[in-house]
Image (cartoon, rainbow, N blue to C red):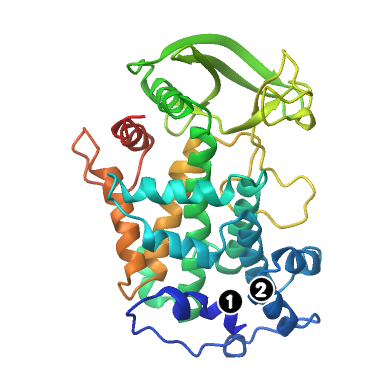
Amino acid sequence: MKYIFGIILTLFFYGCNNSSDTTFEDYNISQPQISMQQIDSLLKDQNYSGVIEILKDSAATDEEYLALGEAYMGVSGLSLSTVIDDILKASDENGSALMDFIDMSAQQTKENQNALEYLNKATDYYMLVIGDRCDDTNETQTLTEFEQEVCTYKGLAQTVESVTTINYVLGYEKDSQKASSCAMQYAFNKREESGCEITPAGDITFSESNETYKSIDIMVNDNHFEYLLKYDNVTQVDEVVVTDGYCSTQSFDTRVDEKIDPEYQEDFHVCPVNLINRDKSYITQSLTDGLSYTTKEGIVDAFNDGTHSILVGDINNTLLKEKIIEFKNEIIKTRQNGDEDDEIKTEDIVTFFQEQNF
């Protein structure tokens, strides 16, 4: 599997001295019945759907899980090579390298309705291989080269999962970015940001998940946007629920992308993203699996876990590591409370978006 394990080293780690001849045989990983040479060829040809079709019901080895992680990132529009290339190209010329990367990712996934689900699955498959071994910085020196590389893959998947969640929340409609910033501000401390008029609209229960949310209406320049809030016991504040399109409260299957869709009904609400593994087609490992997917899980937790895994995996101080540190620092420098902790918090995301002057 030289393609899977060599992609970062050979294509994008400019100027690095990191070289690895590590093979699966070195780790006593059994050979699968399906030819991995065939899988390798499909990945090289970017036939990600083909890889998924072959392995989704039979994957049982680390080698196959890694191939599925790569494939699910590919079908999301954000393949490993694309993600690394975009990270390294991200520029602060217009104020923020992180926002530049967010914008590039939005263009890659804009036409893909299942991008977030695919990235979540990619994270799951990488976690089947590496588990929690990327979590503890003190373990960096004990990780094998194989594990360091998998930490990097997992970290990339989680980082772009966070970025894609940001794009889901920000939306593409006129004034939607301003409205989203106001929604996160209001959820965090119930303050109204200038330029937004916020009206609580009562509780809404989706019978399919039996989840109840607070609904709020945000008006920006006479344009109305609905957001759902859910209280988080960890942060002890409301979090914005990540939504995708509109649906009825009886069934998520009624989901439509826009209000102009002929199937749209007046009693539809913004529809919560539901990443629970309903069909059990893969083993869920990530922290993002659940009935309610909020900005804390999808943005804050995924960003922290993802960037940490990249920094643990990329021990050779490459340009990739430098860009990840730059992304984190751009968020941290917008803090107003003097906190020097490098872990990103919900309030950090709120203040960062406020700085973008949507």
Quarter of the C terminus within the rendering: top left
Q: Residue at x 39, y 75 (%)?
A: 13
Between the C-alphas of marks 2 and 1, the distance is 8 Å
* Whether residue 60 is situated above or below residue 17 in the rendered picture: above
Which secondary structure, mark 2?
helix
Question: Are circles 2 and 1 on residues that touch, CB within 8 Å?
Answer: yes
Q: Residue at x 40, y 57 (%)?
A: 307
Q: Residue at x 80, y 69 (%)?
A: 54
Q: Is residue 139 left or right of residue 31?
A: left
Could you classify mark 1 by the number of other residues whose Cα lies within 10 Å: few (under 14), some (14-19), or many (20 or more)?
some
x, y percentage for residue 248? Answer: 74, 21
x, y percentage for residue 41? Answer: 69, 80
Tell which tag, 2 or 1, sits nearer the viewer: 2
x, y percentage for residue 146? Answer: 50, 79
Where is mark 2, residue-wise? 43
Between discs 2 and 1, the one toward the N terminus: 1
To which quarter of the image does residue 278 belong?
A: top right
Q: Amino acid at mark 1?
A: Ile
Q: Residue at x 53, y 65 (%)?
A: 80
Where is mark 1, residue-wise? 4
Q: Amino acid at mark 2?
A: Leu
Q: Is residue 58 left or right of residue 267?
A: right
Of residues 167 and 130, the one drawn nearer to the viewer in this rendering: 167
Could you classify mark 2 by the number of other residues whose Cα lies within 10 Å: few (under 14), some (14-19), or many (20 or more)?
many
Which secondary structure, mark 1?
helix
